[in-house]
Amino acid sequence: MRYKIRKLPVKVWRTVQEDLLLDELGWRDDETSAKLGTLGLRQEILHQAILYALGFYRECGPNEVDSMKGTLLWGKPIRKLRDLLEEAGWVAMRDCGLQTVYHRGMDIAITAAQGNAATGQRDGVAKIKNPRGSASERAIESNYAREYQLALGLDIERRDAPQRRATYWLLINPTETGANCELSLPNGIVGGQVTGWTDRIFLDPVFDEINDVPSFDSVPSAKVKVVRRKMEARDGGVQPN
């Protein structure tokens, strides 16, 4: 499987070699696939959104405004998820300032943010890097209320249930070679800082460039068919057919 993210300032690749390498390293997790499946998602979709954002993130230089990197890791994944999930019934949602991609049938929303060094790490406590605003606070409080209703055995699937929506955060922590990431459901927030998670879905790490991926002799090379296009002279210059 091979993905090429087009129209980016930096080429971003995900290749079949990486997929095989993840199997070799034992990073793939059946539990992750199962949890994502209940949300109508696949890990590859989330990876494409992350890689799309990383392409812009890597272009940031020393003279960027302070919040630019965090803004890109928030806005660009959401934009890409809206593109990729539209055919599956997801829509853009702007709920009192909280930008998400939303599925009405499941009443599930996804937003994004830059995470800390523990993002994607099972033995760490993930946190959102920057404090959240009032819109995020309302969404997380709604998550807590939903969890409380589930604990009481209430039927949250009823249309008149007071709290049905679950808002997940796609956390991204850039590394030198790519990013660690997870899709997680926060259930507590104090002073703008997330204090707890109902569930954390650990995603495989992503890599920006194929050259950043360590190689193993046991990982076969992908065979790529090269198609050469004929060239012909047009208007005094050489142009592709």
Image (cartoon, rainbow, N blue to C red):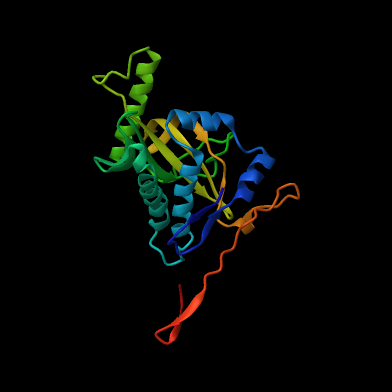
The residue positioned 49% from the left and 60% from the top of the image is 58
Q: Nearer the viewer, residue 101 or 17?
A: 17
Q: Nearer the viewer, residue 75 or 29?
A: 29
Along the horizontal axis of the image, is 176 left or right of 240?
right
Give the percent coordinates (x, y) of residue 160.
23, 19
Kindly give the residue lying farthest to the top in the view shown: 153
Give the percent coordinates (x, y) of residue 231.
50, 76
Q: Quadrant of residue 92?
A: top left
Q: Quadrant of residue 209?
A: bottom right
Res 209 seen here:
yes
The residue positioned 42% from the left and 87% from the top of the image is 236
Q: Quadrant of residue 132?
A: top left
Res 191 seen here:
no
Kindly give the residue lying farthest to the right in the view shown: 217
Give the percent coordinates (x, y) of residue 45.
46, 43
Give the percent coordinates (x, y) of residue 43.
50, 39
Q: Nearer the viewer, residue 213 or 195?
A: 213
Along the horizontal axis of the image, is 199 left or right of 26?
left
Image vertical order of residue 180 relative to residue 122, above or below: below
Kindly give the residue lying farthest to the bottom in the view shown: 236
Image vertical order of residue 220 relative to residue 184, above or below: below
Image vertical order of residue 100 relative to residue 223, above or below: above
